[in-house]
């Protein structure tokens, strides 16, 4: 009996960054569903879940945030090396650490999920922005801590102007056009 050869190809790290409430997780899940329909191996690494499980105990200082992002990047790189499209949905507020990941990984695609602060605040069902403005939450990105916008992201999704479906289409189209995904990945 002949064994079928297993093709090992490099996956992609799709890094969605933006403020809390911009739409990162929603778009990440939409892109994952679309890629799975095409037969791709996909894993979504959500920043909130990573903080709960992989980065529990880290605070929100710059050093701890950088450690958290490096950990997510390490896992994403492992997945990508094994042919998985690793979709990261994490605020990752500091440009320097995102650029570091771009330099130390392969097939890194940065997607800026852009929404004005006021729009993100209006989407905040947990009331985190209000708590941060009241001083109840320290080191909150966009309020008491900075968010450094990407300078040259491969894709920018304006979630205040376009629907989630349009943003998902924009990301998948970019990946397809650039050869990051193939039919039956």
Image: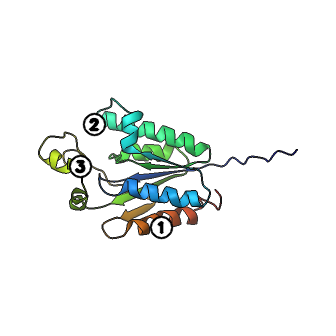
SS at badge 2: loop
Q: Tell me where residue 176 sits by quadrant.
A: bottom right
Quadrant location, the N terminus: top right
Is 132 left, or right, of 4 in this rendering?
left
Residue 110 position within the rendered picture, expressed as x and y whole percent measured from the top left: 44, 54
Q: Which is more N-terminal, label 3 or label 1?
A: 3
Coordinates of residue 101 in the picture (x, y in percent): 46, 44
- Drawn side of residue 25 relative to residue 137, left or right: right
Residue that badge 2 annotates: 60
Alpha carbon of mark 3 to alpha carbon of mark 2: how far?
A: 18 Å
Query: Which residue corresponds to the image point at 23% horizontal and 49% vertical from the top-left?
Result: 126
Residue holding disc 1: 169
Q: Look at discs 3 and 2 and give the one toward the viewer.
A: 3
Q: Is residue 145 left or right of residue 51?
A: left
Q: Residue lying at the far right in this picture: please name it.
A: 1
Write down the residue under mark 3. 126
Q: Is residue 152 visible?
A: no
């Amino acid at each position: 009996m002949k064994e079928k050869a297993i093709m090992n190809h490099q996956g992609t790290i799709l890094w969605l960054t933006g403020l809390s409430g911009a739409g990162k997780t929603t778009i990440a899940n939409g892109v994952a569903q679309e890629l799975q329909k095409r037969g791709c191996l996909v894993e979504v690494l959500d920043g909130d879940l990573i903080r709960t499980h992989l980065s529990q105990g880290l605070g929100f200082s710059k050093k701890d945030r950088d450690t958290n992002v490096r950990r997510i990047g390490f896992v994403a790189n492992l997945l990508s090396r094994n042919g998985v499209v690793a979709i990261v949905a994490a605020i990752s507020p500091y440009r320097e650490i995102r650029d570091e990941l771009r330099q130390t990984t392969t097939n890194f695609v940065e997607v800026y999920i852009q929404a004005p602060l006021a729009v993100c605040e209006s989407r905040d069902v947990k009331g985190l922005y209000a708590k941060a403005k009241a001083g109840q939450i320290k080191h909150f990105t966009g309020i008491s801590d900075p968010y450094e916008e990407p300078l040259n992201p491969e894709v920018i999704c304006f979630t205040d102007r376009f629907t989630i479906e349009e943003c998902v289409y924009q990301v998948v189209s970019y990946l397809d056009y650039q050869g990051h995904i193939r039919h039956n990945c």
